[in-house]
Image (cartoon, grey):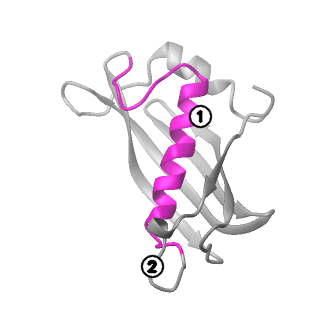
Amino acid sequence: MSSPATHIGVRIYAEDTDLQGIVYHANYLRYMERARTEMMRELGFIKPAASDGVNIVVTKIALDYRRPAGLDDLLTVTAQLEKITASTLQIAQRVERDGEMLVEATITAACLSAESQRPVRIPAPMRQALSSLLLP
């Protein structure tokens, strides 16, 4: 991977907008989920299937909506791993249009046992792969 950040493109269609042609606020969460999924896919971990008996689930989201997106806009959504702890990940996410920041978020995700749904340590192979995404 050439950059530690994952970037995806998202075109805005009528189904993404309200009656005014503005993207419905919750849809940004869907776009961010796609970018995080692609980040994990690039590392060889396919969601939503459990990998190594664990699931990665969002536990906290902090969002800052700055500007709206509208019908037919082409957005760039990024996911950048910021921090890894024993059982959690902190991911910075951005939604931009032509380089203009529209939405910024910090996502916290926890590693849970697929069986018990209780927090567990991130498996070593996953931790090693994720560590390659951290900026020096």
Which residue is rendered at x = 49% and y = 22% of the image? Answer: 45
Location of residue 101 (image quadrant): bottom right
Q: Nearer the viewer, mark 1 or mark 2?
A: 2
12 above or below 126?
Answer: below
Q: Is residue 115 magenta?
A: no
Tell me where residue 76 appears, x and y as whole percent.
69, 54
Circle 2 is placed at which residue position?
18
Of the pair 80 and 78, the residue shown nearer to us: 78
Number of numbered discs on residues: 2
Label number found at residue 71: none
Vertical order, 71 against 99 (above or below): below
Q: Nearer the viewer, residue 26 or 132?
A: 26
**Could you tell me the amino acid type at mark 2?**
Asp
Name the residue: 73% across, 34% down. Answer: 4
Residue 103, image x, y percentages:
62, 67
State whether residue 69 is above or below residue 122. Answer: below
**x, y (%) of residue 29?**
47, 58
Residue 123 vs 108, above or below: the answer is above
Q: Are marks 1 and 2 in contact (CB under 8 Å)?
A: no
Say the numbered circle drawn on residue 39: 1
State the separation of the CA atoms marked 1 and 2. 29 Å
